[in-house]
Image: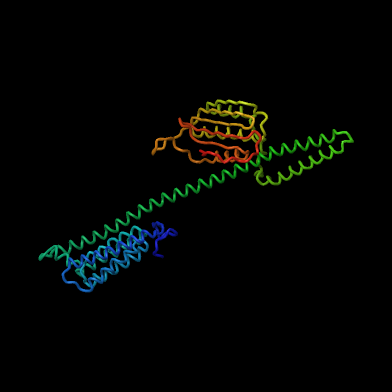
Amino acid sequence: MPDRVSSTAPTGAGDTAVPALPRSAQLSDLALAVLLTGLSAVLLKVLSAGLDPADWVFVPLVVLPLALRRSRPRLAAALVVGATLVQAALAVPIGFHDAAVLLALGTLGGWTDRRTGLLGLAAGLLLVAVGAARGFWGYLDRRLGGADLTAVPALSTAGAAVLVVAAWAFGEQARRAREGDMAVRQRADQLERERSQLAELSAAAERTRIAREMHDVVAHGLTVMVVQADGAAYTLPPDADTARTALAQIATTGRTALQEMRQLLGLLRAEDAGSAPAAPAPGLQRLDALVAEARAAGADVTLATDGDLSTLSDLTSLTAYRVVQESLTNARRHGGHVVAVTLRRTDEELLVSVEDSGRNPADPATGAPAAPSPGVGLTGLRERVTATGGRTRVGPLPGGGFAVTAWMPVSAGGAPDSRDGVAR
């Protein structure tokens, strides 16, 4: 099992893979190791009268591996504990530098898995046992107990064991906290991926439905064109060859366009086996029925129109109908029982506005109405409006409620406008 901590693979049961250690953290660990080595050497010189060469040797051997304590925690702990075990076995007196064992064990438990942390705890307790047998802290015992050394060694051994367990417990707590943070981040990432996938699926389904309805609209127009051209050709006098040729060409072009369109949209319009035939595409001629359905469901819906809506193109009429339909559904879903629907036509543009009294929970941090999360229904609706060359604006109202506003050209098919708002 590799020792280096990385974000690519977990290290065992209950383990949490942590991100690769940045260069700044590695440099800080190196600086800490060098600083503790120098400080330990100074204290060894000040506090110890007669020094053997072995006393100086173990200072760097024990402390310098801390430079790897987070980048390679297993290797660092093995080097620190191993050097300290050798020091205790050789009865070299304990020093300030041996506190590196506690730091190494704490880091081992916090930056690896539970099993490795327990192995580190066992190694630390083994070090305590060896130290007690070899008088590892005898120098401190003599300083603390003077001539009477009856209970001091036992208390020192118990204190050393408590420090080792405390270091392990600190690391274990740090590991659990990191696992919790990482679980929250992973869950948030998963939810974001699922929401993106749902939006993509919804957009694909909406495109499929648009293609089906466009097929019906365009097919109807082309069929009427072909029939009218054929009828006009039959009613012409025998000597009107030029007009008859032109009408024949119109009919031929219409049939070809109709066939090619059916081939292009056939896959998108394919129905499941045994399903019912698709109903004719609705339009604003069914707007009153749609509002009546919403009122029957318990909503207080008002409808206001301005301008002639009967001469709109089929695609614009269909899209406007879908805007109102989806907005009423959205209002019912979010508690908007009072809904105002407004349609206003000018010479060039059709405005569709739907405002409801739905709930907009306040943001706990600012107290302002919370921004709605992107929804899949209005996302598909925005694509419909954009396909006509129009634009949308969707969002909460300042005093509460929600508004969906769409602007579409009277003759659909202009260049899409990118000034879209946010969907609920």
**Residue 399 vertical position relative to residue 273 in the rendered view, above or below:** above
- Residue pushed farthest left? 147
Asked whether, in this view, residue 64 is left or right of residue 254, the answer is: left
Give the tally of numbered discs. Answer: 0
Asked whether, in this view, residue 347 is left or right of residue 234, the answer is: left
- Residue at screen point 82% across, 34% down: 232
Q: Residue 235 is drawn in which quadrant?
A: top right
Q: Residue 20 is drawn in which quadrant?
A: bottom left
**Residue 332 vertical position relative to residue 167 in the rendered view, above or below:** above
| Colour option used | rainbow
* Residue 51: percent from left, percent from top: 19, 72
- Viewport quadrant of the N terminus: bottom left
- Nearest the camera: 79 or 398? 398
Asked whether, in this view, residue 379 is left or right of residue 20, the answer is: right
**Residue 364 vertical position relative to residue 190 in the rendered view, above or below:** above
Q: Residue 277 is drawn in which quadrant?
A: top right
* Residue 395: percent from left, percent from top: 50, 36
- Nearest the camera: 186 or 348? 348
- Nearest the camera: 58 or 245? 245
- Residue pushed farthest front? 347
